[in-house]
Image (cartoon, helix red, strand yellow):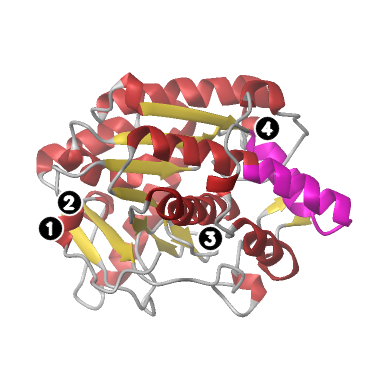
C-alpha cells in the first residue's frame, strides 16, 4: 500500500463505496459499531477465528466455546445491519494460533508449520476480498497489544498488495485502534501515533445500538463490566485536570486512520519488548514480538496470495485444539 494522498474522512465514510470489515474475533466489531452503522446497508464482515481462546473460563471445550461465540457473533451482525451473505466466519482456532506462535521459535519445522497455517488464513481473507471487491477495508491497528489483531492486520495488508498486483486496483486500508499496554490505551491511538487520525461522535441512537450489540455477547459481559469500571475510573482521574468522561461518552467516540505508507511489520511497535503483548502467553510460555512474531510477520507480509489460487481449506476440519492459553478473544 502506497497512497501519495491521504484520503479525507468524508471519502472514507462514503456509503457509495464498498466496505469490508476484517476482524480476528467475535466482538472486535463492537469497537467500530458506530462506523459500521453509518456504512450500512451493504458493508461486508469477516471474523478470521472462531474466538475459542477463553474457553477455559467456562469449563468447556474449545469447540463448544467457539460455537457459542460464533452464534453470538451472528446476533451482533444482524443487530448492526449485515446481510447473511455478506458475513464470513473463518473459524480458525485461537488456541492453535497461540500454540503455533510459541512453538515457532523451537525449530525450523515448527516455524514452517505455523507459516503454512497462517497462510491458509491469508488465502481465506484473499477469497473474501475477491468476492466483495471492496474499495476500503477496515481492520484493527498494528499496535503490539494483541498478537492475533496484528496477525489479521498483517495478512490483510499482504492481501491488499496482492490484489493490486492481480487486478490493478488500490484498496484503501483503514486501521481502528484496539488496545496496547494491556488496556492502558484502549480504543484510542497512542499519543505518538504519526498517521492522520479521524473520529466520529455517535448519536444517542447509534450509541444505544452499539451498547445493545455488545450485550449480544453474554459470554463477554464480565469483561465488558470490568472494562466499564476501568474507563469510569480513568475518567475520574482525567476529571482532576478538567477533562472528565465516563464509559458511555468514551465509547461514543470512535477513532480510525487511513494506512497510506509502506510498513515494515517486522519492526516492533515498542522497542522494549516487555511492552509488546504484555502478559500474553500459551501454557505459561510468553508470546513475544522480538525473536518470535517479528520473524512471523516478516514472512507473512509478503504479497504472495495472488500466486496461490485454489488453496483454501475447510477450517472446521483443519483445527487441532490444545489446552489452556491466556489468549483474549
Mark 4 lies on residue: 56
| Residue corresponding to mark 3 | 145
Q: Quadrant of the N terminus?
A: bottom left
According to the picture, the residue beneath numbered tag 2 turns out to be: 13
Estimate how packed mark 1 is, as few (under 14), some (14 to 19) or many (20 or more) residues with alpha carbons within 10 Å: few
- The residues bearing labels 3 and 2 have C-alpha atoms spaced at a distance of 26 Å
Asked if residue 73 lies left or right of residue 123, the reply is: left
- Look at discs 3 and 2 and give the one toward the viewer: 2
Front one among 268 and 60: 268
Q: In this view of the protein, which residue sits in the foreground, 251 or 267?
A: 267
From the viewer's perspective, tell me whether residue 145 is left or right of residue 88: right
Span of residues in magenta: 93-119
Closest to the camera, between mark 3 and mark 1, is 1
Label 3 close to label 2 by CB (< 8 Å): no
Residue drawn 53% across the image and 31% down it:
90
Query: Image point 36% across, 60% down: which residue?
Result: 233
Residue at mark 3 to residue at mark 1: CA–CA distance: 29 Å
**Residue 61 falls in which quadrant of the image?**
top right
Judging by the rendered image, the residue that carries numbered circle 1 is 10
Q: Position of residue 165 (x, y in %)?
A: 45, 55
Name the front one of labels 1 and 4.
1
Q: Which mark is residue 125?
A: none
Q: Position of residue 181 (x, y in %)?
A: 52, 66
Q: Secondary structure at mark 2?
A: loop
**Quadrant (top left/top right/bottom left/bottom right) for the C terminus:** top right
Res. 300 in view: yes
Do tag 2 and tag 1 residues touch (Cβ < 8 Å)? yes
Q: Nearer the viewer, residue 297 or 306?
A: 306
- Indicate whether 321 appears above or below 142: above
User: Do callouts 3 and 4 mark residues in contact (Cβ within 8 Å)?
Assistant: no
Query: Which percent across, then down, holds residue 246?
Result: 25, 55
Q: Is residue 91 left or right of residue 283?
A: left
Amino acid at each position: 500500500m502506497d497512497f501519495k494522498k491521504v484520503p479525507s474522512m468524508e471519502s472514507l465514510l462514503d456509503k457509495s463505496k464498498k466496505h469490508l470489515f476484517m476482524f480476528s474475533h467475535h466482538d472486535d466489531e463492537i469497537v467500530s459499531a458506530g462506523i459500521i452503522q453509518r456504512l450500512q446497508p451493504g458493508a461486508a464482515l469477516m471474523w478470521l477465528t472462531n474466538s475459542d481462546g477463553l474457553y477455559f473460563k467456562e469449563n468447556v471445550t474449545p469447540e463448544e466455546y467457539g460455537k457459542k461465540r460464533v452464534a453470538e457473533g451472528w446476533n451482533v451482525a444482524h443487530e448492526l445491519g449485515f446481510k447473511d451473505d455478506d458475513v464470513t466466519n473463518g473459524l480458525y482456532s485461537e488456541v492453535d494460533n497461540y500454540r503455533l506462535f510459541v512453538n515457532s521459535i523451537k525449530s525450523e519445522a515448527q516455524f514452517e508449520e505455523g507459516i503454512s497455517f497462517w497462510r491458509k488464513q491469508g488465502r481465506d481473507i484473499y477469497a473474501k476480498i475477491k468476492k466483495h471487491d471492496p474499495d476500503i477495508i477496515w481492520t484493527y491497528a498494528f499496535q503490539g497489544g494483541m498478537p492475533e489483531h496484528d496477525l489479521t492486520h498483517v495478512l490483510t495488508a499482504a492481501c491488499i498488495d496482492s490484489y493490486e498486483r492481480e487486478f490493478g486496483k488500490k484498496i484503501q486500508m483503514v486501521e481502528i485502534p484496539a488496545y496496547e499496554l494491556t488496556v492502558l490505551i484502549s480504543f484510542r491511538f497512542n499519543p505518538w501515533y504519526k498517521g492522520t487520525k479521524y473520529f466520529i461522535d455517535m448519536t444517542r441512537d447509534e450509541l444505544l445500538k452499539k451498547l445493545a450489540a455488545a450485550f449480544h455477547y453474554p459470554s463477554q459481559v464480565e469483561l465488558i463490566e470490568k472494562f466499564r469500571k476501568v474507563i469510569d475510573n480513568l475518567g475520574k482521574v482525567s476529571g482532576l485536570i478538567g477533562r472528565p468522561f465516563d464509559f458511555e461518552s468514551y465509547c461514543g467516540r470512535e477513532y480510525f486512520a487511513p494506512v497510506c505508507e509502506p510498513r515494515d511489520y517486522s519492526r516492533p511497535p515498542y522497542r522494549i519488548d516487555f511492552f509488546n503483548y504484555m502478559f500474553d502467553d500459551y501454557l505459561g510460555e510468553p508470546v513475544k514480538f522480538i525473536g518470535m512474531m517479528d520473524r512471523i510477520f516478516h514472512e507473512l507480509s509478503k504479497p504472495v496470495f495472488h500466486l496461490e489460487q485454489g488453496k483454501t481449506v475447510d477450517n472446521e476440519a483443519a483445527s487441532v485444539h490444545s489446552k489452556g492459553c491466556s489468549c483474549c478473544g
